[in-house]
Image (spheres, rainbow, N blue to C red):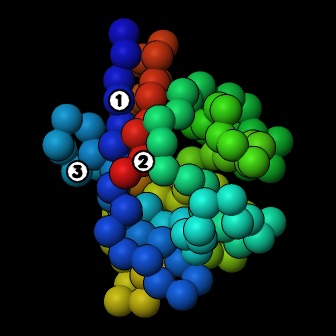
Amino acid sequence: MEIELTLKRWQKGFDFTNGSIYIDSKFICYTLEDQLREPGVKVPGNTCIGYGRYRITLEWSLKHKCIVPLLHNVPNFTEIEIHWGNSIYDTEGCILVGSKLTDRGSIVMGTSLPAFHNLMDILKGYNSIIINIV
């Protein structure tokens, strides 16, 4: 079975990018990423990935010591995961999830891990996962 996530980016700040993940137009969670830069410009650990469609597999993360969604074939990036965290200091290019955002764009403490577990509960029944970042 296949599932497609859509990450809609809707706020670009000086050092962060906010968005929301949807499945078939149903809101799943908010996202927090590093700064969105011009195509081809990358500051290691401080740049979010480019727009596009990416295949996801559920893989063991050495950093987080659990199974996480891992994006594949992301130009100029490796080991891009979707995981929990509360600020851009937790991203290193990855996509953080949460159920609430502060007015500054950070994920409200305590809402990231439940949002991650909810997303994982949705994804674990699928053998083909795609994310479309728009």
Of the two numbered discs 1 and 3 in the rendering, the one whose residue sits closer to the viewer: 1
Marks 1 and 3, the one that precedes in the sequence: 1
Residue at x-position 18% and y-position 44%: 26
Graded by Cα atoms within 10 Å as few (under 14), some (14 to 19) or many (20 or more), the crowding at tag 3 reads few
Residue 57 relative to residue 42: left or right: left
Q: Position of residue 119 (x, y in %)?
A: 41, 41
* Res 30 quadrant in image: bottom left
The answer to which of 81 and 48 lies nearer the viewer is 48
Residue 33 relative to residue 67: left or right: left
Q: Which residue is mark 2?
A: 133
Q: CA distance from mark 1 to mark 2?
A: 11 Å
Of the two numbered discs 1 and 2 in the rendering, the one whose residue sits closer to the viewer: 2
Determine whether label 1 and label 2 are within 8 Å by CB.
Answer: no
Residue at x-position 54% and y-position 87%: 14
Q: Which residue is mark 3?
A: 27
The answer to which of 107 and 131 lies nearer the viewer is 131
